[in-house]
Image (cartoon, rainbow, N blue to C red):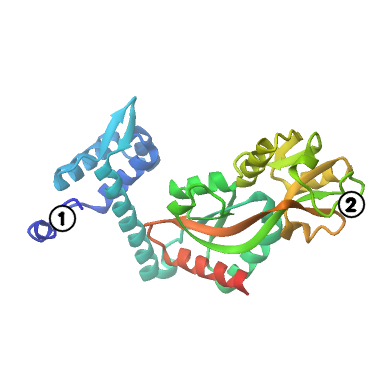
Amino acid sequence: EFMTESSFDERRIFMTLNQLKYFCETCRCHSITAAANQLFVTQPAISLAIRELEAEFGITLFTRFNNRLTLTEDGALFYKKADYILQYCKDMQFELNGSRIQQNPIHVGIPPVLSSFFFPGLIDAYRSKYPDALVSLEEYGSVRACDLVLEDKLDLALVNMEMYNIDQLNSHVLIHDQLVFCVSPEHPLANHTSIKAADLDHQNVILFNKDSVQNAILRTRFDFGNVHPNIIMQGNQLYTMINFIRSGTVGCFLYSCITAGLPKYKAIPMEPPMKTDIGIVWKKGRYLTTQMQNFITFVKKYYDA
C-alpha cells in the first residue's frame, strides 16, 4: 500500500474524481498530449493533476522514455485502485439517477467464427430479460480480445480458453468442444473417420486469423509433425470459408458445435483430438458494474441450461 493504516487515519485525502479521470486516461494513452485530446482539456490541467496526486501520496506515478509514459510499480497499483473508484462511481450514479443518466454499453469481444451461430440467440435472450441494457459486440480473435480486456478496452470477452495468459483473467468455461476438419462430400479426405496432421501435408487448408488461439495450436502441431499444408487463406468469415469448402478441394478447421449446423458437409475429428473450451473472461481486480455482473450471470445460466 502507499501508506500505513495509521498514517491514513492521521491525514485527509484531497484527491478529486477529475484528477483520477485525468490520470487513468493518461495511463491508457501513455501520453499527456493524447489524454488531453481525448478529454478535451489542456495539457497543463492533466500535468497538474498528476503532480498533485504524486505530492499527496508521496509516490512517482510515471517514468518517461522516448516521449512515452510508463507506469511505475506504485503507479500501476494506483491505476488499479483509481480505475476501480471511477467505475464504482459511474455505476452508483446510474443506479441512483436511474433513466436520467445515459447508460454506457458493455463492450463484449466475440470470436467472429462463432458469432453468427451463438450470439444472436444469446443477445436476444439477454435483451428480453434486460430490455434497457446496452451491449456493444466487437469481433476479435481470442488473442486480441484477451489483450483488449487486460487493457480495459473491452469489458468482457468470449474466447478460446487455451490462452497462454488466461491466468491473468477471471474466467468461466461455457462450452466444451473440439476442432474438426470440415470438408465437402467430394473432398479426398471426406471418407476418413478421423485424420492426423500428416494427412494434411500439401492439402489446401483454411486457418483462422493470426489473432486466434486455434491458428497457433494448429501451426504448432504442423511444425511438430513436419507437415506442410497449403494454407490458402487465413480468415474469420464463416460464409467465405464455406464457399471455399464447397469446391471440394479445400478444408477448414471449425468448432464441432458449428459444423452441427452444416449438415451438407463432413466434420472429421483430429487424431489425437483437438479439444478446446470456450468461455467468458474479465479482468482481475476490475470493478464490475451492475450491468457487467448481470451479463456474466446471465451468460453462465444461458449455457448451463
Instruction: Determine whether, in the image, residue 131 is placed left or right of residue 196.
Output: left
Which of the pair 100/173 is nearer the observer?
A: 173
- Residue drawn 23% across the image and 52% down it: 16
Instruction: Determine whether, in the image, residue 262 is placed left or right of residue 168.
Output: right
For discs 1 and 2, the disc positioned in front in the rendered view? 2
Dot 2 surroundings within 10 Å: few (below 14), some, or many (20 or more)?
few
Q: Name the residue under label 1.
A: 13
- Residue drawn 47% across the image and 57% down it: 282
Circle 1: residue type: Ile
Instruction: Determine whether, in the image, residue 87 is placed left or right of residue 4.
Output: right
Q: Is mark 1 on a helix, strand or loop?
A: loop
Q: Which of marks 1 and 2 is nearer the N terminus?
A: 1
Which of the pair 302/187 is nearer the observer?
A: 187
Q: Name the residue under label 2.
A: 191
- Residue drawn 34% across the image and 53% down it: 83
**Residue 12 position (above or below residue 127):** above
Task: Please say whether residue 131 is visible from this viewpoint.
Answer: no
